[in-house]
Amino acid sequence: MNNRSKKIFLIMSIVVPFLLYCIYYYGMMIKNAPYKFSEFQSIRFEYGYGDTLNNIYDSKTGEYQFVNRRDSIVKINLKLSKSDLLYLHRKAADLGFWDFPSNELNPDVKGRVPRYVIQFNYLRKTKKVMYDASYNGAEKLKDANDRLIIEIKKILSDAEARQRNSK
């Protein structure tokens, strides 16, 4: 067997089966992913202090209620674009939102502690996380929650600014 034949045999017997296995394995992983954007329906985001969650956004209806600087409740209709929703879906996936525990509350702390409820609704599944700013869990988990909350607030404020400027 010459050198060229050995290389072809090596490629055909090791590299090609490995590539086929990778394509099959990762294809099945993507196909069976529990939270796909093609099945995405809506996001619901609530926040406030303690059990009083006055700030609420629901992308399904577009209803956005928030407390302004004068402590009065403002209600507007705010629609997020498909690219905004895709960005939030991908950001949640990057931060591992699907693996977050559903309750991240600190029962020991009483008083005015910021609390957040993040809910992603899909065709077959829903993921809802209640997060307390005083949560004393893993630092990486707290950081991922904080980063996701910052991104959602940023997208909402950007969409609100776009809507205000288009009028």
Image (cartoon, grey):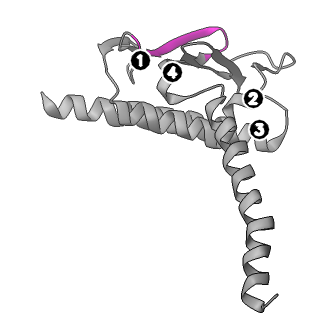
Is 91 magenta? The answer is no
| Residue 141: assigned label | 3
Q: Secondary structure at mark 4?
A: helix
Between tags 1 and 3, which lies in front?
1
* First in residue order: circle 3 vs circle 2: 2
- Callout 3, which amino acid? Leu
* First in residue order: circle 3 vs circle 4: 4
Position in image of residue 45 (x %, y %)? 53, 19
Q: Magenta region, mostly helix, strand or loop?
A: strand
Q: Is residue 57 left or right of residue 18?
A: left
| Residue 59: assigned label | 1
Position in image of residue 15 (x %, y %)? 75, 66
Position in image of residue 1 (x %, y %)? 82, 87
Contact between labelled residues 3 and 1, with CB atoms less than 8 Å apart: no
Q: Secondary structure at mark 1?
A: loop
Q: Is the residue marked by circle 2 packed among few (<14), some (14-19), or many (20+) residues within 10 Å?
A: some
- Callout 1, which amino acid? Ser
Q: Is residue 88 left or right of residue 61?
A: right
Between tags 3 and 2, which lies in front?
2
Between tags 2 and 4, which lies in front?
4
Q: Is residue 62 left or right of residue 47?
A: left
* First in residue order: circle 2 vs circle 4: 4
Q: Which residues are magenta?
A: 49-60
- Callout 2, which amino acid? Phe
Contact between labelled residues 1 and 2, with CB atoms less than 8 Å apart: no
Q: Is residue 166 left or right of residue 112?
A: left
Between tags 1 and 4, which lies in front?
4
* Residue identified by numbered label 4: 39
Alpha-carbon span between mark 3 and mark 2: 7 Å
Q: Tell me what residue is drawn at x 51 percent, y 39 percent.
A: 151
